[in-house]
Amino acid sequence: MTRSVGVIGAGPGGLAAAMLLAKAGAKVTVHERLGRLGGRSGTVTADAPMGRFRFDMGPTFFLYPRVLADIFAACGRRLEDEVELIRLDPQYHIMFEEGGAIQATPDIARLMEEVARIAPDDAAALPRFMADNRAKLAAFKPALEAAFNKVRHYVRPEMIRSLPLMRPHRSIDRDLASYFKDPRIRLAFSFQSKYLGMSPFRCPSLFTILSFLEYEFGVFHPVGGTGAVMAAMARVAESMGVRIQLDDPVEEVLMEGRRAVGVRTRHGAQRYDAVVVNADFAQAMKTLVPDSARRRWTDRRIEGKKFSCSTFMLYLGIEGRYDDVSHHTIYLSKNYRQNIAEIEDGRAPPTEPSFYVQNACVTDPGLAPPGHSTLYVLVPVAHRVGEGIDWEAERDRFRAMTIKRLERIGITDLSRRIRYEKVLTPAGWETDLNIFRGATFNLSHSLRQMLYLRPHNRFEDLEGMYLVGGGTHPGSGLPVIFESARITSRLLAEDLGLDAQWQAPSTMAQPDYEPAVAEAS
């Protein structure tokens, strides 16, 4: 008998799960609220008189493609045949307001030279940092690939073996202090905690593996942007029989007792043998599932959880180019601790914020009309809570301040060159993208919200419901979200008696293919 599965959300986790479940033999339907693919990993498109601008909506760093390559391989496809990936070198340009800069190259010998220009003594520690994190990732990798649905999963032999390397009592910054004395160098290897929406002074030391992953396996640019990856996944899924319905918001999850049995959309009720939730976890629970049906993840408990920061976004289509500005630039404020404290306090926008800029047209000029280019500007800010920040009142002032700060990385004379502009505040993330509190990176990754303590892939509160995405185990970030899809799909397939033999552990080797390498500006 054919089993049917409904997937709520066509984000990266939902699309990956749809591919794998179709491979397992299920009849899969994806319901997407928006009129486009990808959710916060989709594409912003804007048609102007001079042509079309395209921007990544959220993620711009494409890391560790092996997990997604394995998913494509399980479906009989090759990722490199579906998406052109360009490996960047340098990966990004780090600029310190305090002084100094690093062209972050994956060539470790050259990277040591870059570090030595700022902190000669710290450069010698770089090989030790890489070796230690290589061992850390190898030790913890089984935990990232396995479900944590039982407390006893903490005492798996591989989990116990990994604990000494994880150093759970340390933050990222404190752990890095054992390698690097200069605070700027520690920031260069810890700003990646912002991928999780967390401070390096609070984020668990396990996540030093994020910067290691970048240098060990590369930072890639998918030609056409991250949305091109989502489009390729949808293309493959549909070729396997998956039905993807855009502009089709789910209004409620249908229940029989404590079992999810389908969904209701504007097209009516549709019954399924299982339901996969790829929508923002907290928002989906509070709007699609009655509070009375949830035992562990009640509204009260969700309200009491810690959430990531949010972001203030500018998507700018401009006349001309900034070819002297790198594909990725990270600008770290002089008083970084104060910047973080202001974000965590959440009562006002940061006064001298750090920021990130993607100038993708130096690598992929087709993202803009001829003679034009795109700029993606991200400023970490507080998520929405209580009275908090009135972004309607603060929007224009904060925008002007951000554009002024862009001059520090060489983006001058910007205002008169803007031909398209979209501003997205935390309020916009909440209302437009349906993200709880506008917390762009979902539930935070504190020790009390990881592994078994994170919402389970086989959702513990309801039978027949499964979770994928940043709000479940293993957590946020595209490679980890793809891994969540593998875990969830395997559990669901086994529960429905489907063939899950496609589930193979990913290896730590580089992808079998050799993507193009770009000399980034």
Image (cartoon, grey):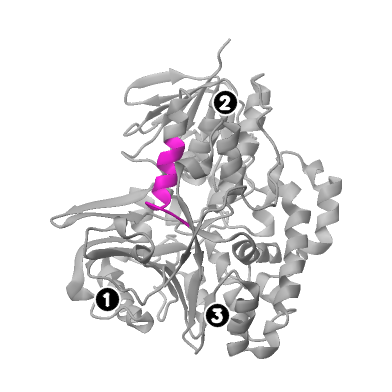
What percent of the width, then of the height, locates residue 96?
Answer: 49, 83
Q: Mark 1: few, some, or many residues within 10 Å (few <14, many ≥20)?
A: few
- In this rendered view, identify the residue nearer to me: 144 or 83: 83
Residue receiving disc 3: 337
The label shown at residue 256 is none
The label shown at residue 400 is 1
Label 3 is placed on what type of residue? Arg
Q: Nearer the viewer, mark 1 or mark 2?
A: 2
Label 1 is placed on what type of residue? Ala
**Residue pictured at 81% horizontal, 56% vertical:** 162
Answer above or below: position of 105 versus 243: below
Which quadrant is the C terminus positioned in? bottom left
What percent of the width, then of the height, locates residue 300?
Answer: 55, 47
Q: Mark 2: few, some, or many residues within 10 Å (few <14, many ≥20)?
A: many
Q: Mark 3: few, some, or many residues within 10 Å (few <14, many ≥20)?
A: few
- Magenta span: 221-234
Residue receiving disc 2: 23
- The CA span between labels 1 and 2 is 50 Å
Label 2 is placed on what type of residue? Lys
* Disc 2 secondary structure class: helix
